[in-house]
């Protein structure tokens, strides 16, 4: 008997990554929509925006101190 065929990838090398990111992102946004904590200013977009603003402020403070 020969060994059964073994697949290394579900879709393809790059297709698996795209598929995983798509499913993960959609799952997060579905959870965010139904989660009451996310409706109080803690959505992903707001968290990313705050982190970006914080990094910009740190960069500006570093420039001004030099």
Image (cartoon, rainbow, N blue to C red):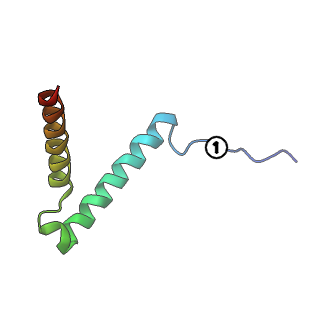
Q: Position of residue 40 (x, y in %)?
A: 12, 68
Q: Position of residue 34 (x, y in %)?
A: 21, 71
Residue shown at 34% from the left, 48% from the top: 22
Residue sitting at the far right: 1
Answer above or below: position of 42 versus 15. below
Circle 1 residue: 7
Q: Position of residue 20 (x, y in %)?
A: 42, 48
- The crowd level at tag 1 (other Cα within 10 Å; few <14, some 14-19, many 20+) is few
What secondary structure is found at the residue carrying circle 1?
Answer: loop
Answer above or below: position of 22 versus 39. above
Q: Position of residue 17 (x, y in %)?
A: 44, 41
Residue shown at 15% from the left, 50% from the top: 50
Residue 52 sits in which quadrant? top left
Answer above or below: position of 34 versus 44. below
Q: Which of 12 and 34 lies nearest the eye of the viewer?
A: 34
Residue 39 sits in which quadrant? bottom left
Number of on-image labels: 1
Residue sitting at the far top: 66
Instruction: Quadrant for the C terminus, please.
Output: top left
Q: Which of 19 and 58 lies nearest the eye of the viewer?
A: 58
Q: Which of 45 and 58 lies nearest the eye of the viewer?
A: 58
Residue shown at 39% from the left, 41% from the top: 18
Answer above or below: position of 17 versus 30. above
């Amino acid at each position: 008997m020969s060994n059964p065929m073994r697949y290394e990838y579900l879709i393809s090398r790059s297709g698996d990554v795209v598929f995983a990111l798509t499913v993960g992102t959609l799952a997060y946004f579905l959870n965010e929509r139904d989660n009451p904590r996310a409706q109080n200013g803690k959505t992903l977009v707001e968290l990313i925006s705050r982190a970006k603003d914080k990094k910009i402020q740190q960069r500006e403070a570093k420039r001004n101190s030099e």
